[in-house]
Structures are given as structure tokens and as C-alpha cells.
């Protein structure tokens, strides 16, 4: 019984452990060892006339870097087939992050700090762009999920939309006694697509053509009878519900948009890396 309880406790701790701290930061330690060994070799090995990618050390570091790039790129394929255990998604992501950062050291030392207008420097530049976009992705995944949970206020996406639908039905009924011009403002707000605005609006959180905001602005000074006051109150509630949904859309977009840079550039890196390796062996 004690063994089962201990195992259950370890499982719960593992479930709540972030990918950056996975297994006591095992992959950070391995990445640091790799960096220290690479730096020590670079400092101690004498290459004439200077360090470069064509020396035996350059080839060794280049091979390690190329294998790491290919291995880390497999995360996008492997993550669909992972389960709990040594190679869970959390373990693979932790390795992906720390060994990806170690590539900055390994690949830079491989170049011998020699750059030019060629496919070799192109591969290096693409690698750095992949790493930088990955760092942005890490910051997003660490900070945004908590904001998403706070904004939801224990509501699912479906419940948010249901709440908006209930307000819309009340507004449709409450707007019937209004004058034609006022009723048309409310109807225009109800007919507008909740998700209209595109990726720019979602990322910025700005919806300058929001008809609910326009209806509020135009009806705000006209509410001098109970029917108009009820409509105005419902419009304010609708605006608050829209703001919650749009904040959720913005946070979700920020959580995903970095992948539109990271994934395509990764494929470009693999292509440039292939060209780099082929050209090196062709002219060897």
C-alpha cells in the first residue's frame, strides 16, 4: 500500500511539473555538459591557421549539430504518438528546448566564427531564427495558459458562446418596441459575426468596426424610457461578453501564431542544412 501511495504521489508531482523543470532539469544539465565539452575542445585544440568548419573539430561539431537539428525537428512528428514514460511529450519538449539552445554554442563553434554570403551562413542564420522563434514560443507557453484560465472564469468556449446567444435573444426581444433607427442599430449588432476581424484583429484585440460598440455609442444618450434603458443595459452586457470572447481569441492566437514562423523556418533550415552538407562533401 505504501509503495502504491508513493508511486501515486510521484505521478501527481510529475503531472504538475513543467516541461522546463522535467526530471530535475535533466536535459538542461546534459545540454550544459555538451556546451562545456564543446567550448573546452575549441579552446584546447590547436587548428592551423585558425578554427574553421573544415577541420576535424569543425566536422565533429558540425556532425553533432546536424544530428541534433534533425532529431529535434522530429518533435512535430513524434508528439502525436507519445504517451507517459521516459519519452512522454513533456520529456521530449524539455529535451527540445535545452538541446536546441545548446545548438547555439555547438553550431557557432563549428563555424569558427567565419561567416559569408553562402549556403553555410544561410543554414546558420535559419537555425538562429528557429531558436529565437522557439524562445518566443517558450515564453508564450509559460505565461499565457494561466491568463487563458483567468479569462475563462471557469467557462468553456461553448458556455461563453451560449451566454452570448442568450443575451442576443433577450436583445432581439427587447429591441422590438424601439423606433426603427434604434432597432436597426441593435439588429446590425446582432447580425455581425462574432469572429469577424481576421488575424490582425485577434492579435491586437482591436475591433474598430464592432457594431455593438457603435450601437452603445449612438444609443447611450437616448435612453430616456424603460425600453431603451433595458436595451442599453443588455448591450453593455453583450459588449462585456464579446470582450471576454475576444480576449480568449487573442490569447489563443498569441499561443499559436509563433508556430507559423517556427515550423516553416524549420523546414527551410532542413533544406539549407542538406545543401550545406552536400556542398561540403562535394568539395571535400
Image (cartoon, rainbow, N blue to C red):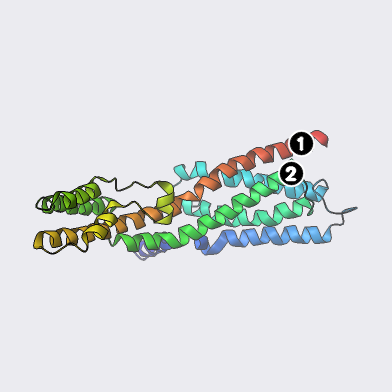
**How far across and down, in percent of the image, does residue 217 sit?**
26, 60
Picture quarter containing residue 36?
Answer: bottom right
The residue depicted at 9 percent of the width and 52 percent of the height is 177
Q: Is residue 152 left or right of residue 122?
A: left
Q: Residue at left 71%, top 52%?
A: 107
Rounded to the nearest whole Å, what is the CA distance between mark 1 and mark 2? Answer: 9 Å
Q: Quadrant of the N terminus?
A: bottom left
Q: Residues within 10 Å of mark 1 (few under 14, many from 20)?
A: few
Which residue appears farthest toward the top when viewing the image?
282
C-beta proximity under 8 Å, tags 1 and 2 = yes
Question: Which is nearer the N-term, disc 1 or disc 2?
Answer: 2
Q: In the structure shown, which secondary structural element does the residue marked by tag 1 occupy? A: helix
- Name the spot of residue 45 as percent of width and height, x first: 84, 57
Is residue 250 shown left or right of residue 134? left
Locate residue 169, reporting x and y percent.
15, 50
Which residue bears the numbered disc 2? 120
Residue under label 1, please give it.
279
Q: Nearer the viewer, residue 147 or 243?
A: 243
Residue 165 visible in rendering: no
Whole-percent x and y of residue 182?
Answer: 18, 53
Q: Is residue 231 visible?
A: yes
Q: Quadrant of residue 275?
A: top right
Q: Is residue 214 above or below residue 24?
A: above
Which residue is nearer to you in this view: 217 or 20? 217
**Which residue is located at x 67 percent, y 55 percent?**
104
SS assignment at label 2: helix
Which mark, by number, is residue 148? none
Amino acid at each position: 500500500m505504501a509503495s502504491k501511495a508513493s508511486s501515486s504521489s510521484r505521478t501527481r508531482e510529475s503531472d504538475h511539473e513543467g516541461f522546463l523543470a522535467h526530471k530535475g532539469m535533466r536535459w538542461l544539465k546534459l545540454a550544459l555538459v555538451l556546451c562545456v565539452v564543446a567550448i573546452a575542445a575549441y579552446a584546447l585544440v590547436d587548428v592551423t591557421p585558425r578554427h574553421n568548419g573544415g577541420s576535424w573539430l569543425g566536422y565533429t561539431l558540425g556532425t553533432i549539430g546536424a544530428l541534433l537539428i534533425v532529431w529535434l525537428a522530429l518533435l512535430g512528428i513524434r508528439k502525436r504518438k507519445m504517451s507517459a514514460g521516459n519519452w512522454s511529450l513533456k520529456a521530449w519538449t524539455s529535451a527540445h528546448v535545452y538541446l536546441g539552445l545548446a545548438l547555439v554554442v555547438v553550431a557557432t563553434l563549428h563555424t569558427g566564427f567565419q561567416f559569408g554570403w553562402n549556403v553555410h551562413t544561410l543554414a546558420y542564420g535559419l537555425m538562429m531564427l528557429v531558436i529565437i522563434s522557439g524562445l518566443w514560443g517558450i515564453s508564450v507557453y509559460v505565461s499565457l495558459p494561466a491568463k487563458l484560465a483567468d479569462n475563462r472564469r471557469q467557462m468553456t468556449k461553448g458556455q461563453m458562446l451560449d451566454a452570448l446567444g442568450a443575451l442576443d435573444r433577450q436583445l432581439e426581444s427587447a429591441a422590438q418596441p424601439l423606433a426603427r433607427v434604434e432597432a436597426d442599430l441593435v439588429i446590425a449588432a446582432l447580425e455581425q459575426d462574432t469572429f469577424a476581424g481576421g488575424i490582425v484583429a485577434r492579435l491586437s484585440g482591436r475591433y474598430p468596426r464592432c457594431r455593438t460598440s457603435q450601437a452603445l455609442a449612438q444609443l447611450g444618450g437616448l435612453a430616456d424610457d424603460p425600453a431603451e434603458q433595458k436595451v442599453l443595459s443588455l448591450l453593455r452586457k453583450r459588449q462585456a461578453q464579446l470582450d471576454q470572447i475576444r480576449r480568449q481569441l487573442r490569447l489563443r492566437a498569441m499561443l499559436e501564431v509563433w508556430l507559423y514562423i517556427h515550423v516553416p523556418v524549420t523546414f527551410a533550415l532542413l533544406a539549407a542544412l542538406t545543401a550545406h552538407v552536400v556542398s561540403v562533401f562535394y568539395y571535400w
